[in-house]
Amino acid sequence: MTEINAQLLKGTLDGALLIVISRGETYGYEIAEKLVKMGFLAIAAGTIYPVLQKLEREEYIVGVMRKSSEGPKRKYFTITAHGEKRLSDFLTDWESLCTAMSQLILETGS
């Protein structure tokens, strides 16, 4: 799988995290693993945690600290109704961007 360019990813990381979290309760390291599995190899854990904090501040996600059977406590995240709306808006914007970019590429023959 091809690694996604870090600069391209920068503007879409919020949406990518919301997608992962919308699929079920999860924690930071698990999110990072899921993204790597999907080809987001350029994302460092140090990049993910500040975005998670921002999403939590904006009330798109909620985090709860819980014991882990595998070591220290972890913060588990779930998406809120506000986050579901933001995700829906992101997906609409993403589709519009993909459509416009595809048209541009086809028009220029690249």
Image (cartoon, rainbow, N blue to C red):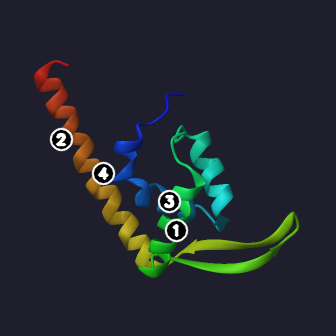
Badge 1 is on which residue? 52
Tell me the residue at 12%/22% (across/down).
108
Tell me the residue at 68%/56% (across/down).
30
- Distance in Å between CA atoms under marks 4 and 2: 10 Å
Badge 4 is on which residue? 94
Which amino acid type is marked by label 3? Answer: Leu
Q: Eyeballing the image, is 1 above or below 36? A: above
Nearest to N terminus: mark 4 or mark 1: 1
Which amino acid type is marked by label 2? Answer: Ala
Nearest to N terminus: mark 4 or mark 2: 4
- Distance in Å between CA atoms under marks 1 and 2: 29 Å
- Distance in Å between CA atoms under marks 4 and 1: 20 Å
Secondary element under disc 1, as helix, strand or loop, is helix
Secondary element under disc 4, as helix, strand or loop, is helix
- Viewer-nearest residue: 1 or 102: 1
Near mark 3 (Cα within 10 A), the count class, few <14, some 14-19 or many ≥20, is: many
Badge 3 is on which residue? 17
- Distance in Å between CA atoms under marks 2 and 3: 23 Å
- In the rendered image, the residue lying farthest to the left is 107
> Mark 2 or mark 3, which is nearer to you?
3
Where does residue 26 sit, x and y in percent of width and height? 66, 65
Q: Are marks 1 and 3 in contact (CB under 8 Å)?
A: yes
